[in-house]
Image (cartoon, helix red, strand yellow):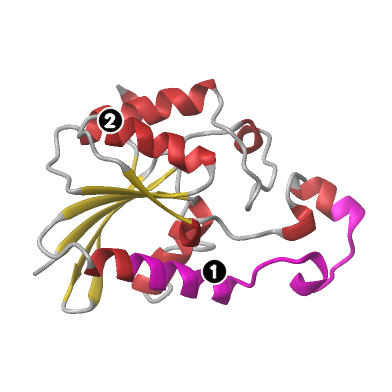
Amino acid sequence: METIMYLIRHGETDWNSSRRIQGHSDVALNERGLRQAELVGARLKQEILHAVYSSDLCRAHVTAEHIAKHFGYGISTHITLRERCYGRLEGLTYEEIRDRFSQEDEETHGIETFDAMQQRAVTALTEIASQHPGQTIVVVSHGGLINSFLHYVTGGLQGTGITKIENTGINLFRFADLRWEVLQVNNTDHLEA
């Protein structure tokens, strides 16, 4: 039996709009992000959904609340669905990082490696999908984590370094026979309403 998973990026934050690295920093949705969350919730209320999952960071959790309210479900919150940790670089823009730091390795800054984040994403999403055979679920997470998972599923044809996942972009996956398949990437039609 297959599981269908809507994997959705959270709504916009002020740090997104100013291009600051968020990582594990718990940054709230801004006014535009709240509207995006409302719109993605309205888009998904026409679907038959069986569960809603979210990262524990408020920008993802609040986005998930705007989806779950249409179904009367609680949200299952998982720390493993967080964005990549960027250590002491969190809160900085890319320009500030270039100005302040020389080229140093990730460990110097306390950055989670890409491979560690990707493995965390694959493990978490596979475990969640395995709990819902024959069902359709929503997972609200973060752009970096979603892109790392997309990179894994497509063997590097899409995802990190290739695909931009917009705020509240909808990505659709099928999980069956322990294999993942991409059905849709970064659908933002709901934002045009």
Q: Is residue 115 above or below residue 26?
A: below
Q: Residue at x 77, y 73 (%)?
A: 107
Q: Give the amino acid at mark 1.
A: Met
Point out the frontmost of discs 1 and 2. 2
Element type at marker 2?
A: loop
Across and down, in percent, residue 9 comes to: 43, 45
Horizontal side of residue 83 vs 126, given as left or right = right
Q: Which mark is residue 117?
A: 1
Across and down, in percent, residue 144 comes to: 53, 57
Q: Residue at x 56, y 26 (%)?
A: 30
Residue 117's quadrant in the figure? bottom right
Please name the residue that numbered disc 2 is placed on.
69
Magenta extent: 98-126
Disc 1 from disc 2: Cα separation: 29 Å
Q: Give the amino acid at mark 2.
A: Lys
Horizontal side of residue 40 vs 133, given as left or right = right
Q: Residue at x 18, y 62 (%)?
A: 132
Say whether disc 1 or disc 2 marks the residue closer to the N-terminus: 2
Tell me which secondary structure the magenta stretch mostly adopts: helix
For the question of whether residue 133 can be seen, the reply is yes
Horizontal side of residue 153 vs 57, given as left or right = left
Residue 168's quadrant in the figure? top left
Q: Is 142 part of what is drawn in magenta? A: no
Question: How many numbered discs, if any?
Answer: 2
Q: Which class describes the residues within 10 Å of circle 1: few (<14), some (14-19), or many (20+)? A: many
